[in-house]
Amino acid sequence: MSAFPEIYLVRHGETEWSASGKHTGRTDIPLTAAGEEAARKLAGRLDGIAYSAVWSSPSQRAANTAVLAGFGPATEKKAELAEWDYGAYEGITTKQILAERPVWQLFRDGCPNGEAALDVGLRADIIIGQLRSANNTVLIFSSSHFLRVLAARWLGSPAEHGAHFVLDTASISVLGYEHDLTEPVIRRWNQK
């Protein structure tokens, strides 16, 4: 346990689309039975940590993960925590996109009629501002690509650097500080 505030990032449990690799931005689909079970198991993994706030993406996959993990009544939904808007790439896989655009990379190229990494980074910066103002331990439930951008921006790196982090469903990661509040770090990443 750190002497400084920690930010717990929880990726939602499995959905049909996350299991099949389809980009799920704004389509609001439910957790699978396996996703619900993994969300329930998060309760034991998050037990005993004192949070000042619990925030969630407005998506049902994130909000229901919070509920099943035991944080439902305490959860505040924040629009900025929504997953990347994939625009024309919503509901299709990277393999399908690469068949038409062989050198496409999400974090570099963004999505037609959707967001670029910079757009997602601006939303992440709003959340980071709120986290730093709160100066307390906060638990966040959201989706993979948004959380990856949030981690990059937490470190002061460009949003595009989120490409270097991978997150599994129902994983827990922790952002924090090293020596003082001017040294943001990743304390733990993608723990299952």
Image (tube, rainbow, N blue to C red):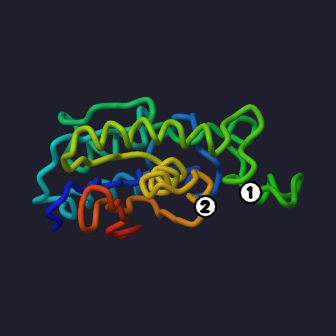
Q: Please identify the quarter of the rendering in which residue 129 is found.
A: top left
Screen quadrant of the N terminus: bottom left
| Label 2: which secondary element | helix
Is residue 121 placed above or below 21 in the rendered structure?
above
Drawn side of residue 110 relative to residue 130, left or right? right
Q: Which residue is mark 1?
A: 105
Q: Residue at x 35, y 54 (%)?
A: 9
Q: Please identify the quarter of the rendering in which residue 81 is found.
A: top left
Residue 122: image location, x then y, percent? 53, 37
Q: Which residue is mark 2?
A: 163
Residue 100: image location, x then y, percent? 89, 52
Q: Residue at x 74, y 57 (%)?
A: 105
Residue 134: image location, x then y, percent? 22, 39
Q: Nearer the viewer, residue 103 or 36?
A: 103
Q: Residue at x 60, y 37 (%)?
A: 119
Residue 32: image location, x then y, percent? 45, 51
Q: Residue at x 52, y 41 (%)?
A: 83
Q: Nearer the viewer, residue 105 or 168?
A: 105
Label 1 amino acid? Gln
Dot 1 surroundings within 10 Å: few (below 14), some, or many (20 or more)?
some
For the residues marked 1 and 2, what is the alpha-carbon distance in whole angstroms? Answer: 9 Å
Is residue 98 placed above or below 143 in the rendered structure?
below
